Amino acid sequence: MATDTEQQLVECIARLPRIPLASVRPTPLEHLKRLSESLSGPPIYIKRDDLTGLAVGGNKTRMFEFSLADALSKGADTIVAGSAVQSNYCRQLAAACAKLGLELHLVLRPVRAVDKMDQQGNNLLQRLLGAHVSIIEEFDHASQKHAIEQKIEKLRKEGKSVYWPRQEDTVDLDAIAYAESALEIYQQCRTLNISPSYIYMAALDTTQAGVELGLAHLNSEIKVRGFCPLNNVTHRHHDIASMANNGAKRLGLNVEIKPDQISNDDGYVGERYGIPTAEGLAAIRTVARTEGILLDPVYTSKAMAALFEHIKTGEVDHDKPIIFLHTGGSPALFAYAEDVLYG
Ligand SMILES: Cc1ncc(COP(=O)(O)O)c(C=O)c1O
């Protein structure tokens, strides 16, 4: 039976504007029996947020239920966003916009030289889903921000009502979506009668912020270990804590998380964002061949490689289950085919 804190979280989230977009919710929490045995470590469970729906699924689908509801409530007819060419965020956004009849403009930044030409993986799907895609020449974030601002100005001059999601005043909505995933995990652990020690996950900011918010509100003993896909994001602990706290404020919950309570490790990025690591690629193959589950080369594979290493070095208790939060990303496999098979 749901406790008062669970009920309170459900009720606070239910007060927000929301559009149903996910095909599967709650997503399953599955035991990875063969993978756990092959690593001779703790029982590993996987939270299948790769199955949320919206053109191959992933963590962003939950978020667009809130952020696009916000866009529609503000009268938007056009969405503008930017990320990397192989962005899972932009692919799921393209599917959501198609479903809602919103015009979408994506201003994408190449990460590898091949990204400028190769219409594969997420980039293929963004176009298939009807997004207007432009890829900038430069590789840096500042040039991309400038290009997005120019695009917005042009569209507004043409009379469009433009919404740019995931900005400072709305990003906590994305985190709130993940407080709900944390609640699902909490309830599924009770049903399965397991007490995990950690949730391992690929995490830059909003997803971890939401999981931290949900678990803190529920007074859960499960701890989170996030693995950042980028080097040198020095403010990330602060950002995660402040997104969680802003989400709590919007929901009216009494949660205050401090940056030093956040575990977010960038030690498994390798060379840089968007470049796979040998350990991550090996993890993709192992998980595919033991469980039939697809990780991705940019985010989840690096978090899984961290879990493999932690099991080997004894940084996790072998008697307590571990949860791996699968945030999706498999379409990118097609844009990294050589690496995935032979790297
Ligand atoms: C597969 C995958 N995992 C994790 C993340 C990180 O999500 P967040 O930026 O919410 O931390 C992303 C971001 O795009 C992603 O595509």
Image (spheres, grey):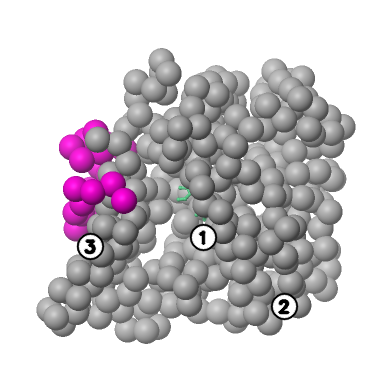
Looking at this view, is 18 or 243 the one in front? 243
Q: Earlier in the sequence, mark 2 or mark 3?
A: 3
User: Which numbered marker is on residue 253?
Assistant: 2
How far from the left and from the top, in percent, is residue 288?
53, 24
Does the magenta-highlighted stretch encompass residue 320? no
Query: Which residue does the image show at 69% across and 50% down from the upper left?
Result: 263
Residue type indicated by callout 3: Ala
**Residue 191 screen position, x and y as percent:** 80, 50
Q: Residue 270, how many percent across, how many down? A: 50, 32
Question: Of the residues under marks 1 and 2, which one precedes in the sequence?
Answer: 1
Residue 288 disc label = none
Q: Is residue 341 above or below residue 300?
A: above
Q: Give the distance between the C-alpha atoms of the residues marked 2 and 3, in whole angstroms.
A: 38 Å
Pick the quarter of the image with the N terminus: bottom right
Residues shaded magenta: 114-140
- Among the two numbered marks 3 and 1 on one chain, the one whose residue lies closer to the N terminus: 1
Q: Quadrant of residue 46?
A: top right
The image quadrant of residue 35 is top right
What residue sits 31% from the left and 51% below the top?
A: 140
Return the residue at label 3: 147
The amino acid type found where label 2 is placed reads Leu
Q: Tell me if residue 127 can be seen.
A: no
Label 1 element class: helix
* Residue 294 horizontal side relative to residue 80, left or right: right
Name the residue located 46 percent from the left edge and 57 percent from the top edge.
61
Residue at image mark 1: 62
